[in-house]
Image (cartoon, rainbow, N blue to C red):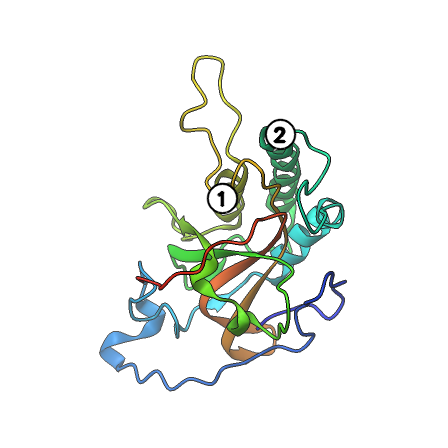
């Protein structure tokens, strides 16, 4: 699991300050080099144990800096904050994520591509945060209780999933987009949470199966640790 030792945890659970590394014996053949794989589903080869460097830590720090104030204002129970409606909350958060996008695009220390070599698909599992009880790493997250955001790069993206693609797709799924004057609300709505929720991503977390200096390889999904979400019913995963 990747986490920041300078993070200020909240609630009853917090990410560990130490990187959690899962050793793997993936057994890929030379003919099926994981550096050349671009898995399109979680059960595809190379999704869990790929050899792509995950270039995300600086972007995660930027996101956490910008969402910290909103996350700190979230109450443990409804009403989660002082916004009278989900749309007012969404408007506020869209502005936050637009600022994240502007600064990320201008930041030379944040790589353009999230993966090297490029990948074009990854799932972000949105989980209620803080997690009641023990939390060491994403191993403690019940994935069946998460909502899913599929991050997919368009075919024309030579760099696969880029920082701007990631930010835009997260923001749209969480907070929708502003409607134009010539359209109805349909198609502009958020996809995560309910009208009574006021979701704020405090930070992202993930497991890695290999780390070398500043290079790390993600293991499976990316998890959005999100305050202001109602608990979801648990069910058997079909994925």
Q: Secondary structure at mark 2?
A: loop
Give the number of marks: 2
Looking at the picture, how far across and down is residue 127, in whole percent? 54, 57
Q: Is residue 152 above or below residue 134?
A: above
- Give the quarter of the image for residue 91: top right
Q: Which residue is mark 2?
A: 85
Q: Is residue 228 left or right of residue 32?
A: right
Looking at the picture, how far across and down is residue 103, in whole percent? 66, 43
Mark 2, Cα crowd under 10 Å, few <14 / some 14-19 / many 20+, is: few
Q: Is residue 145 above or below residue 99?
A: below
Q: Is residue 189 above or below residue 232?
A: above
Looking at the picture, how far across and down is residue 49, in whole percent? 39, 75
Mark 1, Cα crowd under 10 Å, few <14 / some 14-19 / many 20+, is: many
Depth order, front residue of 169/15? 15
- Give the quarter of the image for residue 4: bottom right
Residue at the spot 66% in from the left edge and 33% down from the top edge: 92
Residue at the spot 22% in from the left edge and 77% down from the top edge: 31
Q: Secondary structure at mark 1?
A: loop
Give the number of the mark in front: 2 or 1: 2
Quadrant holding the N terminus: bottom right
Q: Which residue is mark 1?
A: 192
Q: Is residue 105 left or right of residue 54?
A: right
Depth order, front residue of 125/120? 125
Depth order, front residue of 155/11? 11
């Amino acid at each position: 699991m990747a986490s920041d030792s300078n993070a200020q945890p909240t609630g009853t659970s917090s990410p560990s300050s130490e990187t959690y590394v899962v050793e793997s014996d993936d057994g890929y053949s030379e003919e099926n080099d994981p550096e050349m794989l671009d898995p399109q589903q979680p059960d595809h080869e190379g999704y869990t144990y790929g050899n792509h460097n995950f270039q995300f830590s600086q972007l995660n720090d930027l996101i956490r800096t910008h969402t910290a104030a909103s996350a700190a204002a979230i109450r443990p129970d409804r009403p989660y904050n002082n916004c009278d409606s989900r749309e007012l909350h969404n408007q506020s958060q869209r502005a936050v994520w637009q600022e994240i996008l502007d600064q990320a695009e201008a930041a030379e220390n944040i790589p353009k591509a999230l993966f090297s070599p490029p990948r074009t698909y990854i799932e972000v599992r949105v989980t209620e945060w803080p997690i009641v009880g023990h939390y060491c790493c994403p191993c403690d997250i019940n994935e069946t209780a998460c909502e899913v955001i599929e991050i997919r790069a368009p075919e024309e993206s030579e760099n696969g999933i880029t920082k701007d693609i990631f930010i835009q797709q997260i923001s749209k799924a969480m907070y929708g987009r502003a409607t134009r004057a010539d359209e109805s609300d349909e198609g502009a709505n958020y996809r995560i949470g309910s009208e009574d929720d006021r979701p704020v991503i405090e930070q992202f977390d993930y497991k890695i199966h290999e780390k070398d200096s500043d290079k790390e390889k993600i293991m499976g999904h990316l998890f959005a640790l999100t305050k202001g979400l109602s608990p979801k019913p648990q069910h058997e995963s079909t994925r």
